Structure formats: C-alpha cells, structure tokens
Amino acid sequence: MSFKTKTSETPSEKLVRDISRVTRKQYSAEEKIRIVLDGLRGEATISELCRREGIAESLCYSWSKEFLEAGKRRHAKRGRHDQHIAAKVFYGEAED
C-alpha cells in the first residue's frame, strides 16, 4: 500500500489561501439575527435567502439552530426566576 506524501504548497497557493482567510466575511450578531429572522418569516426559500446573502445553507441552518436554542435557554432561565418569585409571593416572603 503506498501513501502519497504531502507536497509543499507553492508560494502562489499559500498567497491565495492567506488572502481568502483574511477576506472571509465576519457577520455581526445583528446581521446573523436579521438573516435568521428573514429565513423564519418564510417570504423566500432558504436557498434564495442564502444566495442573496452570499452564505452557505449549512451556515444559515446552524445560525437558526443557535438562535432557537438561545431562546429556549433564555425562556427556561426566565421561567425558573418567575417560579422563584411566585413561590416567595405564595409563602409571604415577597419584598414590598
């Protein structure tokens, strides 16, 4: 069984790789939320939305998943806080 040895990359290949790394678009949280909400509205397909925004569908789906999970965590956290307050009121321990 023979294995190919990794050839060293040429200077031009390294330059292209470095340029693409530097020029990769960084999206702010607000931009991500806007894109996710556009997708959730359903006015356009995810494919159309991703083409328009210049992102991969997999990236859009991962942002959507993160967005929805963050909402669930926030809701669960808020729910525990509300339950704690309700218990204090029920037992007469609430502060005026």
Image (spheres, helix red, strand yellow):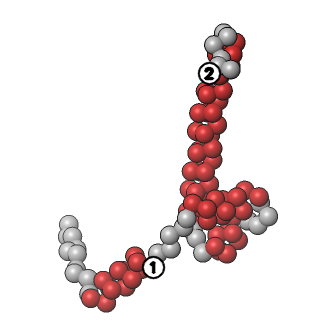
> Which of 3 and 76 lies nearest the eye of the viewer?
76
Q: For mark 2, does the 10 Å Cα neighbourhood hold few (<14), some (14 to 19), or many (20 or more) residues?
A: few
Label 1 CA crowd tier, 10 Å (few <14, some 14–19, many 20+) = few
- Alpha carbon separation for disc pair 1 and 2: 49 Å
Q: Is residue 78 left or right of residue 16?
A: right
Residue 60 image point, x, y percent: 60, 62
Residue 4 versus residue 38 in the image, above or below:
below
- Label 2 sits on residue: 84
x 39%, y 83%: residue: 19
Q: Choose mark 1 or mark 2, whichever is in front.
A: 2
**Residue type highlighted by circle 1:** Thr
Outermost residue toward the top? 91
In this figure, which residue is indicated by the disc labeled 1? Answer: 23
Q: Which amino acid type corresponds to the residue marked 2 in the rendered image?
A: His
- Say above or below: 42 vs 49: above
Q: Residue at x 76, y 67 (%)?
A: 44
**From where the camera sits, is residue 58 visible?**
no
